[in-house]
Image (spheres, rainbow, N blue to C red):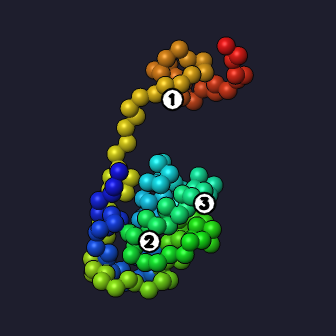
Amino acid sequence: PRLDGPQAPDAPLPALSTDQEQAEFVRTVATAVAEEVLGRSVDPGRSLVNQGIDSLTSVAFRDELQKRLRKPLPASLIFDHPTVNAIASFMATQEAPPGAVAQPPSLSLAQVHGPLAVCGMSLRFPRAESTEAYWQLLEAKTDCVGLVPFD
């Protein structure tokens, strides 16, 4: 799903007055792009490689981030700056792109993360006969680790 707001590829870029504002904007955009590429939430303080980005998806991440920020980025971006926070710090020191619009970003949690829905599940549940029973075990924080059955 494509995002709306300042982190969307065709949205005007805000002109941000401080390195901190620039870093926060880049952190928001980079987190949104990483989550789109990986299909799940990411921790901005953890290495993107450790969160599942490989050499192929790093190119997709860099290309999409480059498009949204309208700035050239090195091919080795996530290897030189392995976390979203490191990318934000790096980008805050770069020049603002030409044509930046003077308005601060206004992001809601829904714009950054989007809605989430569990539409269905299908798997084998340890110590549970149904999905409802499995959810109850999860809610109760029950340890269900055991040997894998051979049947």
Looking at the rendered image, the quarter that the C terminus falls into is: top right
Q: Are marks 1 and 3 in contact (CB under 8 Å)?
A: no
Give how far across and how far down residue 26 sits, in percent. Answer: 44, 70
Of the two numbered discs 2 and 1 on the same chain, state the one appearing first in sequence: 2
Q: Residues within 10 Å of mark 1 (few under 14, many from 20)?
A: few
Q: Which mark is residue 66?
A: 2
Is 117 drawn above or below residue 99 in the view shown? above
Is 49 drawn above or below residue 136 in the view shown? below
Give how far across and how far down residue 85 sits, in percent. Answer: 54, 67
Q: Residue at x 43, y 78 (%)?
A: 71
24, 34: nearer the viewer:
34
- Distance, label 2 to label 1, CA atoms, is 41 Å
82, 132: nearer the viewer:
82
Which residue in the structure is indicated by mark 3? 55
Q: Secondary structure at mark 2?
A: helix
- Distance, label 1 to label 3, CA atoms, is 37 Å
Specify whether residue 105 is in view: yes
Q: Residue at x 40, y 70 (%)?
A: 67
32, 61: nearer the viewer:
61
Specify whether residue 24 is in view: no
Give how far across and how far down residue 29 sits, in percent. Answer: 41, 65
Amino acid type indicated by mark 1 = Glu
Q: Are marks 2 and 3 in contact (CB under 8 Å)?
A: no
Of the two numbered discs 1 and 3 on the same chain, state the one appearing first in sequence: 3
Which residue in the structure is indicated by mark 1? 139
- Distance, label 2 to label 3, CA atoms, is 16 Å
Q: Nearer the viewer, mark 2 or mark 1?
A: 2
Q: Secondary structure at mark 3?
A: helix
